[in-house]
Amino acid sequence: MFLGGSGRMQGNKYRVLIVSSHPTQYSVPLYRLMVRHPKLDILVAYCSLQGAEKGLDPEFGIEIAWDIPLLDGYPWVYVPNRSPRPGLGRFWGLINPGLWRIINQNHWDAIVIYTGYVYASFWIVTAAAKMKRCALLFGTDAHEVRPRDRRFWKTYLKAFLWPYIFWLADIVIVPSTGSVQLMRHIGIPDERIVLTPYVVNNDWWLKQASRADPALIRALWNIPCDAPVILFCAKLQPWKRPQDVLRAFAQADVPNSYLIFAGEGPLRKSLEEEAQVLGIAHRVRFLGFVNQSRLPDVYQAADILVLPSEHEPFGVVVNEAMLCGRPVIVSDRVGAKYDLVREGETGFVYPCGDIEALAQILREVLPDRERLRKMGEAARKRMETWSPRENIEAFVQAVEKAVQRKRGKKE
């Protein structure tokens, strides 16, 4: 077991163990802020170091490692994964028995689980926390029961099991009002639900965006400075529906417009071939995988982001684009629509899979660069109150409520 920091209690703080599947570029800045909060003394336990260490990302289809530090500035521990087939996305892909010892050999006021019930390690933590009688918080970003692969039996099973699973927690942490509605729908009472906004490092994005040179980036892409540019920034996977953007772009046929794909995945070849067939290949650019430090440049060189996913619990690319002053178009299956997309003000929402509806929005807004600029300003303004500040305060509130609830049970 590799210790990356200490979880020792300092002063009158809640001692909190956060269990996460792996480091992400979105959660790490929050952990760094939690360390500085006067009410928190945290330790993050990772079940995998994927992302911080170079390795194959099965969804991108290539080896990646994020080019920003993910293991600095907060206390963490790596708990060895004993799975015979280690990996993310499979129930038996994370088996971390060392979590039991960490929970039982230390005093924790609260334990937060972000691994998800789809991993064996989730159940190790849940069982240990119940035996230790610690306050227990579950984090979920779901806003619908339907699974990514749309299999009916999974939908039925989730609808049946979720009420029992989430009732195990003293508090359920969710990132959007859509997730709040889902938890209410499955029977979790409001007093056991806390909305902790799904955020990115706003300050970093604003700073990097201010340094970007859109004209230089467009020159590298061989795109005129005055051309309307659409951006798709996601993995080229079926559930992201990148083909919808390509077809809507062709159907809209806005003069002198361009489409950028920032992302990698198994659909790339078919998208390139379809662009040729549609006769628009000269106006489509494929950037491949773009690492974190280069993304602000990409957003700044575009005019609008399109996220057409059929399964998207939230979609933090929406946060990123809006912080870079770019409006967004999202399908009605994207979780960010509930809190960030204000119709006609910061962006647009259309029915998932409706190519004509998406094409119509593109026809309407792409020729009007001034309207896009004003919407981008409104988008950036919206993010002022959807930031790490709101997330951390809500997280502290969730911990306090969970601890109070657990203490009430003991009394």
Image (cartoon, rainbow, N blue to C red):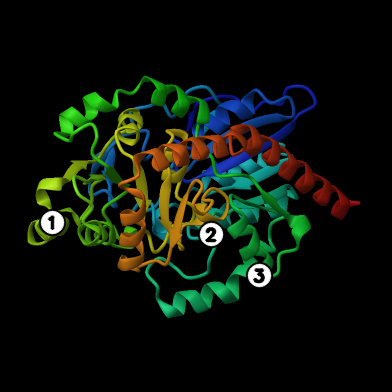
Q: Earlier in the sequence, mark 3 or mark 1?
A: 3
Residue type at mark 1 is Ala
The residue closer to the viewer here, 130 or 356, is: 356
What is the CA distance from the residue labelled 1 to the residue labelled 2? Answer: 33 Å
Residue wearing tag 3:
185
How packed is label 3: few (under 14 Cα within 10 Å), some, or many (20 or more)? Answer: few
Q: Disc number at residue 275?
A: 1
Position in image of residue 194 (x %, y %): 69, 50
Q: Judge by depth and name the residue closer to the eye, 99 or 110.
A: 110
Tell me the amino acid under the disc marked 2: Ala
Q: Quadrant of residue 351?
A: bottom left
Q: Is residue 199 left or right of residue 283?
A: right
Residue that appears at 51% across and 79% down? 156
Secondary structure of residue under mark 1 = helix
Identify the mark at residue 142; answer none if there is no mark.
Answer: 2
Q: In the rendered structure, which disc, 1 or 2, sits on the residue that comes first in sequence?
A: 2
Splitting the image into 4 quarters, where does residue 37 fall?
A: top right
Neighbor class of circle 2 (other Cα within 10 Å; few <14, some 14-19, many 20+) is many
